Amino acid sequence: MVSVAFAAVNFIIGIWAYWSVSSYNNVMEDFKDNWEMQPIVDIQTSPSMCPNGYEELIQGKWPGTNAG
């Protein structure tokens, strides 16, 4: 009986570990993608749209941030 409970707990921990590693791989893929981008060399503020030749710096909400 104890070995069945031990096996069940190990199975659950194994599933949890798999999902943890899978989400970590996405973080590493995002890091690689960001590393391959061009560096930021100039930032301008604008009350409405971006000037020609510029793109939005913040495009939405980043994970882990709160409205402030």
Image (tube, helix red, strand yellow):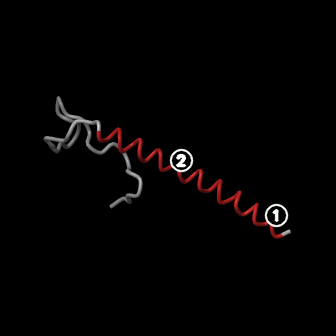
The quadrant of the rendering that contains the N terminus is: bottom right
Within 10 Å of the Cα at label 2, are there few (<14), some (14-19), or many (20+) other Cα atoms? Answer: few
Q: Hey, what amino acid is under mark 2? A: Ser
- Place of residue 21 in the rendered image (x, y in percent of width and height, measured from the top left): 53, 51
Residue 40's quadrant in the figure? top left
The mark closer to the camera, 1 or 2, is 1
Closer-to-camera residue (2/59):
2
The residue positioned farthest toward the front in the image shown: 3
- Place of residue 57 in the rendered image (x, y in percent of width and height, measured from the top left): 26, 43
5 is higher (above) or lower (below) than 27: below
Q: Hey, what amino acid is under mark 1? A: Val
Query: On residue 26, which mark appears?
Result: none
Number of marks: 2
Left or right, 19 with reference to 48: right
Q: Residue at x 21, y 36 (%)?
A: 50
23 is higher (above) or lower (below) than 54: below
Distance, label 1 to label 2, CA atoms, is 27 Å
**In terms of secondary structure, where does tag 1 sit?**
helix
Closer-to-camera residue (64/56):
64
- Place of residue 38 in the rendered image (x, y in percent of width and height, measured from the top left): 22, 36
The residue positioned farthest toward the top in the image shown: 52
Within 10 Å of the Cα at label 1, are there few (<14), some (14-19), or many (20+) other Cα atoms? Answer: few
- Place of residue 6 in the rendered image (x, y in percent of width and height, measured from the top left): 75, 66
The residue positioned farthest toward the bottom in the image shown: 2
The quadrant of the rendering that contains the C terminus is: bottom left
**In terms of secondary structure, where does tag 2 sit?**
helix
Query: On residue 4, which mark appears?
Result: 1
Left or right, 27 with reference to 42: right
Residue at the spot of label 2: 22
Left or right, 44 with reference to 19: left
Q: Residue at x 48, y 50 (%)?
A: 24
